[in-house]
Amino acid sequence: MNNVKAVPSHVGFIMDGNGRWAKSRKLSHYKGHEAGGARMFGLLRHSFEIGVKTVTCYVLSTENLKRDASEVKGVFLLVSIAIKIFIELSDEFHVKIKFAGDMHALSPRLAKALHKVEEHSLQYEAEGKCIYVCLAYGSRNEIVRAANKALQKGETLTEESLLASLDAPINLDLVIRPGGEHRLSNFMLYQCTYAEIYFSDVLFPDFSDEEYDKALEWYASRKRNFGLRKDNTATKPNN
Ligand code: IPE
Ligand code: IPE
Ligand code: MG
């Protein structure tokens, strides 16, 4: 990749367009999700090769759980098949893996298997790299669960403590949404406060490393102000 000046520390992918990709090829929706999953692993490798520290993959939303049961089951099956690849990636790039979302929506068996992946990857925590996998995830649900935890403990939340109590307690620098839609669809509303948001018409399974590089070059060209005057040197807020 050429001319990328500023590499974002945390990139989020809204993995949209799997269904249309499959339909245009007369394939099942499952095959679309399978192709999207394979592409995500390519994008994860590319991310860590170029120095991105944290990558968040939005796999399945709380709203997606209301889709046809067989489609949802198919996504969970693909995640369980991918466990081996998550472990390989974790070991290769020394990256921690964390599943974000309401784990009660998963079968106890899958939840346990994913927890094992998290535990395995904890050995790399000190290296500062992380993959967040958003599964049965909704930003509103994440915020409400975090707020309820504080309520139960009788704590008063602050902006910092709310962020710290989220499943993925880290601000996003760049959000990439392939698939042609221009919205966040309940993705990390709190963590996106000052994220740059890149939209692409390319369907997720076709979102190549070259398309990713285009998004990264666009990101590098952005001037981030964080609410300061344009002639000030922008400093990134630490929360
Ligand atoms: C995104 O692909 C992945 C999930 C929501 C699980 P879609 O299944 O929404 O694909 P399109 O938008 O129908 O093409
Ligand atoms: C967003 O895609 C959710 C994920 C990619 C996991 P959707 O296809 O669910 O989003 P909408 O319905 O077009 O907003
Ligand atoms: Mg969609």
Image (cartoon, helix red, strand yellow):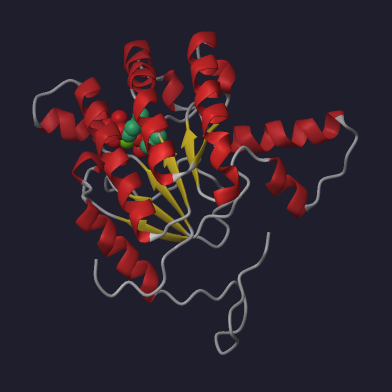
Front residue (pair 120, 51): 120
Q: Is residue 217 left or right of residue 115?
A: left
Q: Which quarter of the rendered image does ligand 3 occupy?
A: top left
Task: Locate residue 138 relative to residue 204 in the image: left or right.
Answer: right
**Quadrant in the rendering for residue 112:** top right
Q: Is residue 54 left or right of residue 176?
A: right
Q: Residue at x 54, y 45 (%)?
A: 188
Q: How many marks?
A: 0
Q: Is residue 129 left or right of residue 82?
A: right
- Residue 7: image x %, image y %? 41, 66
Q: Quadrant of the C terminus?
A: bottom right
Q: Nearer the viewer, residue 62 or 237?
A: 237
- Please give the name of the residue rendered at 35% of the width and 21% of the height, measured from the top-left corner: 75
Which residue reaches farthest bottom? 231
Q: Residue at x 22, y 43 (%)?
A: 203
Hey, which quadrant is residue 3 in on the image?
bottom left
Viewer-closest of 57 and 88: 88
Residue at image x 57%, y 21%?
A: 103
Position above or below: 11 against 219: above
**Where residue 204 sits: x, y (%)?**
26, 42
